């Protein structure tokens, strides 16, 4: 089997709660600082304490997923704040059962299985082409949602043409 290589980086857009948390923390800190400066020093001190708390809470909110396909192995890493990388999953393509777009009817048989574990490593943006990869390993079924590039999709299709669908 020939060597294959593809790399994709996808920005995670699913963190809506993080954006709301950031806005609430900033607003709360400003209110405490303003109220404390005008009326009571205790609230000003609490506002001063809230500044580092807010920064430490919000420092890991920017995430990207990196897919690295080398030969028959798909490695998925998360990159936080464009500086910290952590490998979160590794899948052998020999265990791939099916790969199709998320809303494809080819996946209906797998979605009816209550044992199916879903892992979402996509951006969450419905306008992007998101694929589901079904892996069966050690008696466990996993659905992995990814956003492959054309190069990555072609590499997987080249080695596993009978189970990769593009509708």
Image (cartoon, rainbow, N blue to C red):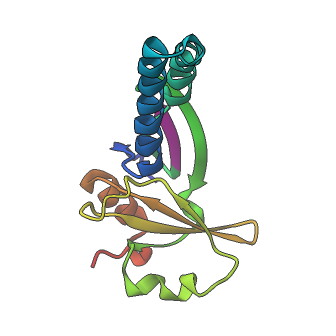
What percent of the width, then of the height, locates residue 137? 69, 65
**Residue in front for this viewpoint, 135 or 17:** 17
Q: Is residue 67 visible?
A: no
Is residue 114 placed above or below 146 in the rendered structure? below
Q: Nearer the viewer, residue 143 or 125?
A: 125
The residue lying at 48 percent from left, 16 percent from top is 39
The prevailing secondary structure element of the residues shown in magenta is strand
73 on left or right of 100? right
**Farthest right residue in view:** 138
Q: Nearer the viewer, residue 80 or 151?
A: 80
Q: Is residue 62 magenta?
A: no
Q: Quadrant of the C terminus?
A: bottom left
Residue 97, picture quadrant: bottom right
Give coordinates of residue 61: x percent, y percent.
Answer: 46, 35
Q: Residue at x 29, y 53 (%)?
A: 149
Q: Where residue 36 appears, x then y in whole percent?
A: 49, 16
124 versus 31 height, above or below:
below
**Residue sitting at x 38%, y 58%:** 124
Q: Which residues are magenta?
A: 74-80
In the rendered image of this protein, does residue 32 appear above or below residue 64? Answer: above
Whole-percent x, y for residue 142 in the image: 61, 67
Choose top left, top right, bottom left or bottom right for residue 5: top left
């Amino acid at each position: 089997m020939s060597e294959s290589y593809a790399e994709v980086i996808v920005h995670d857009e699913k963190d809506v709660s993080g954006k709301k948390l950031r806005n609430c923390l900033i607003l709360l800190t400003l209110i405490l600082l303003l109220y404390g400066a005008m009326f009571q020093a205790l609230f000003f001190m609490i506002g001063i304490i809230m500044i580092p708390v807010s920064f430490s809470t919000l420092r890991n909110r920017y995430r990207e997923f990196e897919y690295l396909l080398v030969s028959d192995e798909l490695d998925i890493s998360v990159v936080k704040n464009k500086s910290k990388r952590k490998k979160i999953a590794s899948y052998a393509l020999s265990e791939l059962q099916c790969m199709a777009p998320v809303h494809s009817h080819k996946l209906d048989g797998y979605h009816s299985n209550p044992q199916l574990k879903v892992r979402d490593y996509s951006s969450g943006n419905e306008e992007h082409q998101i694929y589901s990869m079904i892996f069966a390993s050690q008696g466990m079924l996993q659905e992995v949602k990814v956003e492959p590039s054309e190069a990555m999709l072609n590499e997987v299709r080249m080695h596993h043409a009978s189970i990769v669908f593009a509708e």
